Amino acid sequence: MHSAEEQQNKLLQAQIDIGRKLASSTEQDELLTQILRLSRNIFGFENAIIRLLEKETGELVTAASFGYPEDAEKVRIVPGEGIMGQVALTGKPLLVADVETEPGYIGGIRGARSELAVPLIANGQVIGVYNVESCRPHAFARSDIAPLLSLAGLAAIAIENSHLYRELHAASSRNRELDQLNRQILQSASLGIYSLDMKLRITSWNPRMEEFSGVKAAEALGCKLLILFPHLRKEGFEEALRQVLDGGQPGRLKLAHRNLRGELRFQKRRLAPLRDGRMITGILVMVEDITDFQRLLDQTIQTEKLAEVGRLSAGIAHEVNNPLAVISYATQLLQREQGQNSEQLELLKRIGDEVERLKTLTGGLLSFSRSGETVLRPLDLHQVLQDVLLLVCYELGRKTIELRENHDDMPLVMGDSNKLKQVFINLVMNATQAMGRGGRLTITTGTTTDGDARVVIADNGPGIPDELKAKIFEPFFTTKQEGEGTGLGLYLCSNILAEHNAGLALDTAAEGGAEFSIIFPGMSGGRSYHKHSAGICK
């Protein structure tokens, strides 16, 4: 009786110890080894083995043991085969007083005579077998079954906990990997991506959105979108968001708006509902910035317009030249007739001069309208500048801009006349737009100390801030008001001059405006001397 009480107390203490171990450890091998050690102390077993059903094969495979030879541990048992196989198949304990009378016995310890096996059951399913053997017949009693089942139950709990932990750990790892992948996608995406909750509060904000908006994620998260960007209400964005939340259908729209840095941006936005099952929990917004594409498209359209204007100008110039030729011929005939007084002769001379000026102007239009590859020829830059001033003098006069010319001789250069006219026209027109009415434009020519040709176009306008000078030659960058420029003029000038091996530099003019200086490689053996055309823009 005392022995049974002592065994019961040991079993109770073992259960407490195993319970503590279950609470502090999820390692299956460690827990099973602890259970076998405690069962040895309680029952005095010289051996014990726990075999588990392998899911892939359905066989019983050793998970933990002591007192068994290595070759016995390696044996794989099919359910229904041997004593442990029968327990695995029926789910009921089996006590064999003498294994020599058991025809299906599978060898375990050497010299075994008796065996006791109990099932390990979890969630109503047999997951393994707890088995002990002895070299003595009738070594186990039926009173040993219940306490051994108790330990087997703890072993089953340990195994189930270990499986659950592994599955949870695997699921957690997959979730971490998925979360990391999602973060990498958001970090690397060329699209701006952010999400909103049902109250239109920002719940995510990727780096591309930081770049587009000028707002850092730390500043955006938790803020209401329409409070952070109130202009979106005027653009109808709130209505589009509400339609997605109410109807659950994706939406899209195109917006032109200014970000918090004041930059005008063109964006495509795609809206998609965020769902938890069937319930809408928020909105995913994907933003594609198409500003550069839009500006390039606008520039292409403008280029087509200019090309068409050029073709029309060429046609008009041809048409104008025909009556000019008739007027010129008639004037020459009248000048040859006798009997005209001095006033009449002066009038005819004036007509002839104006006809020649018009021919020069239409000739410039015809020349400028021609396009093609860059063809470098020896050029007199003074003549190119005079042709340009003929074309722009009306605009200078309309804005009452004073033109000052400071010319000195300089070498001839290799260049394409039409493309250099485009450069000079662009620089002059930029200056007139910057100055407004009543400004002063100064054109200076001369020779550098290295013998190169130098042309300087300066104005007394507001100038260009130092922080913008580094960006002024970048494509699509402009300081003009919206609709007044595409930001490609100076970029194209820079490219054309690069084709001529010429340098273009921006500085502050003496009168405070902008000063563009162009240095052309000079040709040896040829000089250009300015032939002043008095009154060209008077």
Image (spheres, rainbow, N blue to C red):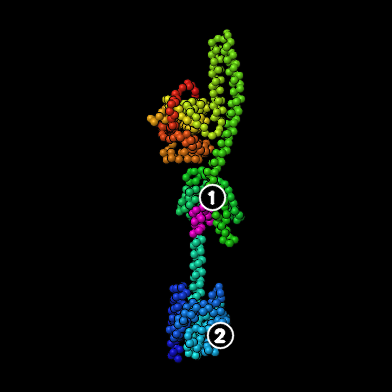
- Residue type at mark 2: give it: Gly
Residue name at image x 51 percent, y 55 percent: 185
Alpha carbon distance from label 2 to label 1: 73 Å
The residue at the far top in this view is 339
Which residue is denoted by mark 1 in the rendering?
A: 287
Residue name at image x 51 percent, y 71 percent: 164
The quadrant of the image that shows the N terminus is bottom left
Q: Where 30 sits versus 516, above or below?
A: below
The residue at the far left in this view is 449
The residue at the far front in this view is 525
Q: What stretch is highlighted in magenta?
A: 180-200
Estimate the x, y position of residue 318 in percent, counting from the top left.
60, 25
Q: Please, what secondary structure does the residue beneath circle 1 have?
A: strand
Q: Quadrant of residue 307?
A: top right
Q: Does the magenta stretch include residue 353?
A: no
Of the pair 130 and 527, the residue shown nearer to us: 527
Q: Please, what secondary structure does the residue beneath circle 2 have?
A: loop
Mark 1: few/some/many CA within 10 Å (<14, 14-19, 20+): many
Q: Where 442 sits versus 275, above or below?
A: above
